[in-house]
Image: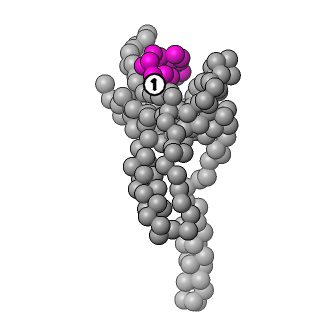
Amino acid sequence: MNKAFISCFSIVFILGCSSGAKRLDNNTDYVADSGGLTSQELVRAAEKLADEIGVFFKENPQEAGVFVAHFPTRNDTSEQIQTELFDNAFVSKLIKNKVYTVRTKTREQSLNEIQFSLSGLTSNRLSIGKLKSPNYFVRADINENLFTADGEKIVEQSINIELVEVETTIAVWSEKVSYRKQAVRGNKGVGW
C-alpha cells in the first residue's frame, strides 16, 4: 500500500508542477496595468513610423541612395521599456522599405577587420572604400506625461522621432505616436 501511495503522490506532484505559467497568445492586445507601453504597441509604432519614412523617401528620392544612421531610442519615462524591441522592429521595417541602416557604432570593428584582411593573412581582401556613410540620422525618444482627469490617473507615453539630414543638420521629417491609458489604482499603478 505504501508503494501505491507514493506512485499516486508522484503522479499528482508531476501534474501539479507541469501546470505552471499559462502561455498567452502573442496576437492578443494587452494593456499594461501601469499604463506603460507593451511590446505590441512598440512594434506597431515602429512599423508605422518606418513606413512613413519609406513614403517620405519615395516622394523625395536620393540619387546616391538612402543610408540612415539610427541612434538607440532613448527612454525618458518612469517605466522600463524595451527600446531595443522598438529599434529592431523599426530597422527591420526600414529595410523592407529599401531604406538601409548604417551601424555607426560598429564602424571601428569594421575598420579593424578590413585592416586585418589587408595584411595579407586572409584569403579575401576587403576594401575600405566600400564603407557607407549615412546621409540621414534618425533619433527617437519615448517620453511620458502623467496627469489626472476626473480623478483618474492618466499616463500618456509618446514616441517622438525625427529624420535629420547629415550635411545640413536640418530636420526634414518628424512624427509622433502617442498612447494614452488609464493607470490601474493601487500599488500596481504608476507611482506618483
- The x, y position of residue 9, in whole percent, is 56, 77
- The residue at which mark 1 appears reads as 166
On screen, 91 above or below 154? below
Q: Position of residue 20 (x, y in %)?
A: 55, 59
Nearer to us in this view, 115 or 3: 115
Instruction: Name the residue furthest left.
Output: 192
Residue 136 lies, in percent from the top left, at 50, 27
For the point 59% across and 83% down, which residue is it? 7
Is 8 placed above or below 145 here? below
Front-most of 187 and 179?
Answer: 179
Q: How many tags in the picture?
A: 1
Identify the image quadrant of the N terminus.
Answer: bottom right
Side of 172 where 146 appears, left or right = left
- Residue lying at 62% horizontally and 30% vertically, measured from the top left: 65
Asked if the stretch drawn in magenta spans residue 168, the answer is: yes
Q: Residue at x 64, y 18 (%)?
A: 60
Q: How is the image coloured?
A: one colour
Amino acid under disc 1: Val
Q: Which residues are magenta?
A: 161-177
Residue at disc 1, secondary structure: loop
Residue displayed at 56% across by 78% down? 10
